[in-house]
Image (spheres, rainbow, N blue to C red):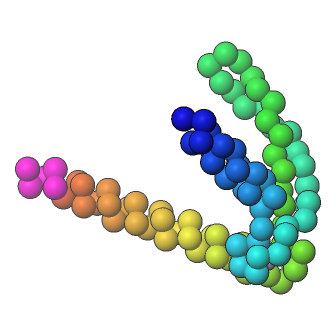
Amino acid sequence: MINTLKTKEKRTEINYSSLCVRCGKERVFSKRWKEKVKTFTGFVEVTHVEMLCPDGECQMLVDGIMAGKKEKREQMEKIKSDRMKRVKRTA
Ligand SMILES: [Zn+2]
């Protein structure tokens, strides 16, 4: 149980230092902003931190990759829901 917790902590640390997914360079701080998020109990202030690759060109490519991934995922979800509808119709 303790071991599992330790592994989890380590993983969070790696995410926080955030290396560039493309070139593996350590990302640099870009901006920090606060946002109020509504929860069941009220508003919670969340601090967002944006980290970018020190290589501007690389970061642009990474943004492109991310956008492409998102598009692909949305497409996949659409196909999946279409398929579900079809299944419902035949059933
Ligand atoms: Zn990079």
- Relative height, residue 58 to residue 8 (above, below): below
Residue 71 position within the rendered picture, expressed as x and y whole percent measured from the top left: 53, 69
- What is the chief secondary structure element of the magenta stretch? helix
In terms of image quadrants, where is residue 77? Answer: bottom left
Taking the magenta stretch, the answer to whether it contains residue 48 is no
Residue at 90%, 74% in the rendered image: 54
Q: Residue furthest top?
A: 41
Q: Residue furthest left?
A: 91
Which corner quadrant holds the N terminus?
Answer: top right
Position of 77 compared to 14: left or right? left
- Relative height, residue 28 to residue 45 (above, below): below
In terms of image quadrants, where is residue 39? Answer: top right
Front-most of 13 and 37? Answer: 13
Is residue 60 visible in the rendered structure shown here?
no
Residue at 70%, 50% in the rendered image: 10
Is residue 1 visible in the rendered structure shown here?
yes
Q: Residue furthest bottom?
A: 57
Front-most of 78 and 58? Answer: 58
Taking the magenta stretch, the answer to whether it contains residue 88 is yes
- Relative height, residue 66 to residue 31 (above, below): below
Position of 27 compared to 70: left or right? right
Residue 40 position within the rendered picture, expressed as x and y whole percent measured from the top left: 62, 19
Residue 62 position within the rendered picture, expressed as x and y whole percent measured from the top left: 72, 75
Residue 19 position within the rendered picture, expressed as x and y whole percent measured from the top left: 77, 68
Q: Which residues are magenta?
A: 87-91
